[in-house]
Amino acid sequence: MALQRLCRGSGALGCRRSSGLQGQLPGKLVEALRAVVGTPNVSTALAAREQHGRDESMHRCSPPDAVVWPQDVEQVSKLAGICYSHGVPIIPFSTGTGLEGGVTAVRGGVCFNLTRMDRITALSTEDFTVAVEPGVTHKALNNYLRDTGLWFPVDPGADASLCGMAATSASGTNAVRYGTMRHNVLNLQVVLADGRVLHTAGQGRHFRKSAAGYNLTGLFVGSEGTLGLITQATLRLHGSPEATVAAVCAFPSVQAAVGCTVQALQACIPVARIEFLDDVMMAACNRFSGLSYTVSPTLFLEFHGSPSSVEEQVRQAEEIVQLNGGSDFAWAREPEARNKLWAARHNAWYAALALRPGSKGYSTDVCVPISRLPHIVGETHRDLQESGLTGPIVGHVGDGNFHCILVFDPANLAESQHVKEFATRLARRALALDGTCTGEHGIGLGKRHLMREEIGELGLTVMRQIKATLDPKNLMNPGKVL
Amino acid sequence: MALQRLCRGSGALGCRRSSGLQGQLPGKLVEALRAVVGTPNVSTALAAREQHGRDESMHRCSPPDAVVWPQDVEQVSKLAGICYSHGVPIIPFSTGTGLEGGVTAVRGGVCFNLTRMDRITALSTEDFTVAVEPGVTHKALNNYLRDTGLWFPVDPGADASLCGMAATSASGTNAVRYGTMRHNVLNLQVVLADGRVLHTAGQGRHFRKSAAGYNLTGLFVGSEGTLGLITQATLRLHGSPEATVAAVCAFPSVQAAVGCTVQALQACIPVARIEFLDDVMMAACNRFSGLSYTVSPTLFLEFHGSPSSVEEQVRQAEEIVQLNGGSDFAWAREPEARNKLWAARHNAWYAALALRPGSKGYSTDVCVPISRLPHIVGETHRDLQESGLTGPIVGHVGDGNFHCILVFDPANLAESQHVKEFATRLARRALALDGTCTGEHGIGLGKRHLMREEIGELGLTVMRQIKATLDPKNLMNPGKVL
């Protein structure tokens, strides 16, 4: 998700009491946790619990019964073992920037705040690999890599933890060229419910490919903490582009913008970013940032490569833009000029919120085959008009993934309900077009009711069987995904 | 695996009687199979069974008790249900080009020959997707796509079935740029042991990315038929490159060739193929094809893109080649000239076999972090000399994956044993360097003893738990992988 922040401050929606152990853990259990990490690293204070019971989504806060701050994997393993023997839920937490309520403690339990595990190890500039702990965010990693000529391209917008991004199968604006977390995680260290430590591709291994048995790494990427706690991720790095060019262009219709995207991909232009903003979003961006872009469906592009390669990419892209009736093609090379050009895209979230001062935002997350985009965007526009809702659209059009940023008054319960119903209608529209209800935010709490429709009865059964096998007591982030 | 054929004619090693039902199935079961697919599509004849009891590896033939030829997924489902109710093993078979004994019926059972299911459906040139049945090979698909401007890049050398390639997590020479089957399969239709039909990403869905629940597609890719029968694969296609340039260059050492590869990747040259041949292999190729390449470590490269982009790539690559002491840099643009330039690489397998007329070949398949390649290739050379074995090396150096083509006399049992021992030593050497025992051929029969060393005790336990969950009677291709 390339929006900067979603549902910031949703804690204002208030915290419900945890439904599990009602904020009370057996004294023995708390003592055992303290014995592992020390008294200051265990908290049962309401403030700490409430702070850990929510993410940035519109889901109501559900505080855990305690929060622990382990320092290393051995401590995580011991803490999990204690929770396991007491039958107490385990919820992972790092930056809290999730968008689907993934960290809410709907059954109470112990929240594992993993941010103090923040080591970056095993960097190999020859192998293009690095290993990170859950406290390392993608911005921190890229700062660390600055002088190496390498970078990690997956960027979900918020400065999320890389292990958290692995847990939710994050992607963002660079995915069209560099892939999602599914393509860029090589190995995971995972603490299972009972405290055992699994290395999904074998301890310390960081090869680029393998055909040795079941792809356990792939199974844990996107499992949203329901199968185990990710305590280290080995990532695939990429060479930093020598040159970068940003471009923006306007189109007469959604169809034209999507047609341009398809043709650019068919022409093998290795576009690094290709983002779509609809006319409502563009108008909002103009108003918010004092810009004067044409108010029509617009593509924001970015090209990476050698100086001459990016120039050629720009030239090819401009041709395709013109063939599709695009106009006002502008491009920029230097960082400052690029940032200025992309300002509208970068500020899209805030521009949307500014449409209704005091409002909150909720982002939908459907992803469809790219050919279905014009149809679903058209239907979504109609639905917004009929519903009287405000929801500018921004999307990773090269992936077929788009977000409708619904801005609403959280105090207006009827409107909040309308937003939820709209989101479900949109998800079902995507499902009917062979798409998915979530391209990159995950299922969390809010989309569980859509899982059966998306994956089918047998798919859901198989997922539940896998969950039951790896977490027989249903302690790992219970109530999520399935 | 980019070798044309491995262990061709290994049937000469002879067939062992099936150890399961001894070639005899209950008459009722055979009748039930015939009722589903018709009498001509069920065979219990020895010739058919022996033909289906082997692949192209050095593993001894183990014939199934019967072979069935279903025509569609409904028949596969019914046939599986019958086998399930009788407790009889189910073994998938398509082109039989596997390299690790994956189709051998070590416990007897019914072989499902899926080659008559050969439909290509749901091609979408806008979405870059297509669905194929198990009878469709990658060459057949690329022929079908010829006029669409799209292609499917994963090419394991042999003209394998795409569903079989999904089952074994195949890759080959293009993987450095386009990824392996793990990156290019979007959805699978799978018949489970009891006949139920699973769609791993939901029926008919063909989106580019999703964060909806566990990645079942990724779990089945590489499962080698041990979790279910793949009856359809939805694949991601790529735009055909406008221009292609092939190049070859010689290096003073393995270190120099690998250094050149690392630098090319760090410079973000989007090389499509980068293949390494050692001096022994080059000498063999010269002799086999009447060529006069320098006998030293050599890289074969291929560049894809627009005409000016590939020219720039070649220019950049040539610079890096020179920086690493490379010489004799030759390149070609037209198909005929390219084929001539790459002839040595294309004929590597036959050139290796020709080193000892009448010999057979066995290909190792380790993959290590690329920085470890010089070390492991050096050690492997030493081991070959000490063992008195002949084993030229060819590798997908951009992935860290290489094959040592061991040529030996199959009638000489001591030598066959030496080959096996050498392969295990090499695999352990790769494991000690954080690598894998199999980059792309799979575990099959021959590498099961290495799984624990690679993935660890807990990893193996988790894989076994997943297997037991999805195939509780252990009927799906039993005796493989785990």
Image: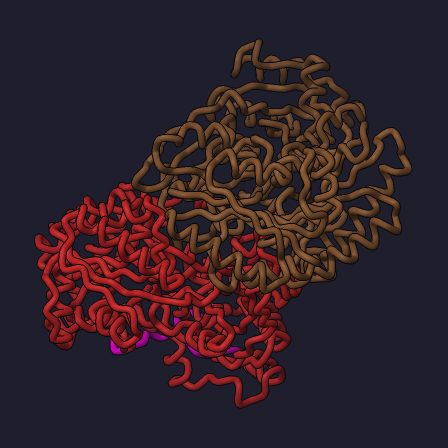
Chain colours: A brown, B red
Does residue A145 show up magenta in the picture? no
Is residue A17 positioned above or below A203 on the image? Answer: above
Which image quarter is the C terminus of chain A in? top right
Q: Main secondary structure of the magenta part?
A: loop
Q: Is residue A408 left or right of residue B95?
A: right
Residue B413 appears in view: yes
The span picked out in magenta is: B12-25
User: Between A144 and B369, which is closer to the camera in this rendering?
Assistant: A144
- In depth, the one of A51 and A347 nearer the eye is A347
Residue found at the far bottom of this picture: B40
Q: Position of residue B16 (x, y in %)?
A: 32, 74
Identify which residue is drawn at 35% across, 30% down: A147
Query: Where in the figure is residue B428, as x and y percent of width and height?
Result: 26, 47
Left or right: where B351 falls relative to A59 = left
Q: Left or right: where does residue A322 sit relative to residue A128?
A: right
Side of B395 relative to B80 (left or right): left
